[in-house]
Amino acid sequence: MDEYADIPKGVSLEVIEGADTSATFNIANKTITIGRADASDLKLSDEYVSNKHCQIVFRDDHFTVIDLQSLNKTKVNDNVFQQRNLDDGDILSLGKTKIKFRWVKLDM
C-alpha cells in the first residue's frame, strides 16, 4: 500500500491553543502520529501530551483519530474518544493543546 496514494488535498491541522500555537501541519500521508516524541509527524512540546498520543489515519473516504492509550486521553469537541471520524472544523484536545482539523473538500 502506497503511504502517499489517494490522500485528499487541503487537509491540515492547526494548533489553536497551547505551547505550539500557530503551528500548521499539512497531512500528506495516510497515517500521521501526534505526540511529544521526536519521531512524531506532528511534534508537540506540551508536557501533558504523551510521547505517542494519537494517530490520524485516512481510510477509504474519511480521516479517523485514534488515541494511542495516552495518559490524558484524546478529546474531539470536548468528548473523550478512543477512535472517531473527523469532520472539517473538529477540535482535538491533547493535554493543554487544542488542534483544529481542516479539510477543505475541493470539487473534483
Image (cartoon, grey):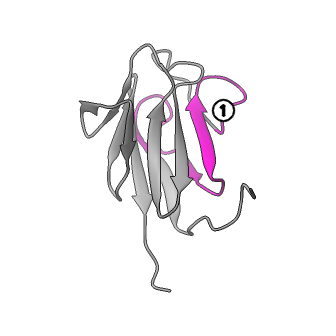
Circle 1 Cα neighbour tier, 10 Å, few/some/many (<14 / 14–19 / ≥20)? some
Q: Looking at the image, which residue is at 59% across and 55% down?
A: 27
Vertical placement of residue 3 versus 77, above or below: below
Q: Which amino acid does label 1 sit on?
A: Ser
- Observer-nearest residue: 18 or 40? 40
**Residue 96 among those drawn in magenta:** no
Relative horizontal placement of residue 10, taking residue 77 as reference (left or right): right
Between 5 and 100, the residue placed more toward the observer is 5
- In this rendering, the count of numbered labels is 1
Quadrant in the picture for residue 43: top right
Foreground of the two, 107 or 25: 107
Q: Which residue is drawn at 45% across and 84% down?
A: 107
Residue 41 coordinates in the image, percent (x, y): 66, 39
Q: Is 34 left, or right, of 97 in this rendering? A: right
Report the residue marked by disc 1: 40
Residue lying at the far left of the rendered structure: 78
The structure residue drawn at horizontal position 65% and vertical position 57%, both measured from the top left corner, is 28
Q: Is residue 37 above or below residue 61?
A: above
- Asked whether 22 falls inside the magenta stretch, the response is yes
- Residue 3, how many percent across, how many down? 72, 54
Magenta span of residues: 15-41
Q: Which residue lies furthest to the right in this view?
A: 2
Q: What element carries label 1?
A: loop
Report x, y in % for residue 6. 63, 68
Measured as percent of width and height from the top left, residue 83 is found at: 40, 36
Q: Which residue appears at 70% of the width and 65% of the height?
A: 5
| Quadrant, the N terminus | bottom right
Toward the bottom, the furthest residue is 108
91 on left or right of 105: left
